[in-house]
Image (cartoon, rainbow, N blue to C red):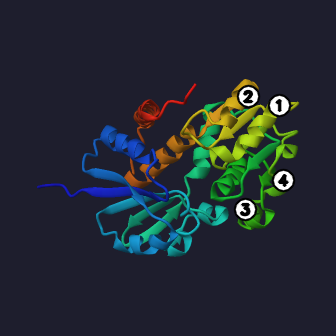
Amino acid sequence: MERRNIRAAVLGSPIGHSLSPALHSAAYAALGLTWWRYEAIECDESRLSPLLDSFGPDWAGLSLTMPLKRAVLPLLDRLDPLVTEVGAANTVLLAAEQRLGYNTDVAGMVRALGAYGVGTAGHVGPVLILGGGATACAAVAAMRDLGERSVAVAVREPVRAAALILAAERLGVTVQLRPFDSASLPGARLIISTVPAAAADDIARALAGLRPRPRVVFDVSYYPWPSALGRAAQHAGAVVVDGFELLLQQAALQVELMTGRPAAVAEMRAAGRTELGRRAQMAPKAKR
């Protein structure tokens, strides 16, 4: 008897750059789930509701990226308590004709930092988070899980940080809003950038003259790498955590939620690094 294919996908816009298909497909192969298929689907907020309505019983789950992590909430039947706290879901399970929302970004951040020894020996702060979107909310929750009760958040427009402030209140974390410039850097021992790589270029230039310098810089971007911030942090002698580790760890948790099996993290990491290497080889070479 032929086995019916089970489908899953990552949704977002733009989505062509996503590394998730390489990671999830590697996990399915390692687990022997040859009838599982994972793809990337271009989807913005206006298309999300009709797209969700179109998924049939062969669909197991979805990964969500920008700009859908908040937009999906009113379209879900049940929310994991962490989703309610953070105000964002990056994972949807499609089961028994219900849409169940989860957030694996938070635990993914904790695991990514832990892979570099951050948070395993106690206090990690003072913490500065760059950006105020859904990923920044996940960062606040991750800091809560690591024992921090106060973080600084640098944003360009404080009025747009309202959702983050509400999330921090639900999480029991005090947020100090700061301007998005070099004046916000002094004193930070852990900097977490949740903004697009180029948006942190001015911050990167300021790191060289900062005293004391941050101990850890976590940039959630992963391609191209190193970002200007990642490069500056390396030169400053900081421990640098890149977004690939976050992507890997949150994807591994998604695989476990969707399949009910332990994720093949080593195989996922190898597949992701291979794909990043392939992209780097295909990228136009910078002129000297």
Q: Nearer the viewer, mark 4 or mark 1?
A: 4
- The disc, 3 or 1, on the residue closer to the chain's N-terminal end is 3
- The disc, 4 or 3, on the residue closer to the chain's N-terminal end is 3
Q: Nearer the viewer, residue 227 or 68?
A: 227
Residue 217: image x %, image y %?
71, 36
Q: Which residue is mark 2?
A: 238
> Tag 1's secondary structure?
loop
Q: In which quadrant will I find the C terminus?
A: top right
Q: Nearer the viewer, residue 281 or 64?
A: 281
Q: Which residue is mark 3?
A: 164
Residue 108: image x %, image y %?
57, 45
Mark 2 crowdedness (10 Å alpha carbons): few <14, some 14-19, many ≥20: some
Question: Does the rendering let one see residue 282?
Answer: yes
Relative to 277, is 155 above or below?
below
Three-letter code, disc 1 = Arg
| Marks 1,2: beta carbons within 8 A | yes
Q: CA distance from mark 3 to mark 1?
A: 26 Å
Mark 3 crowdedness (10 Å alpha carbons): few <14, some 14-19, many ≥20: many
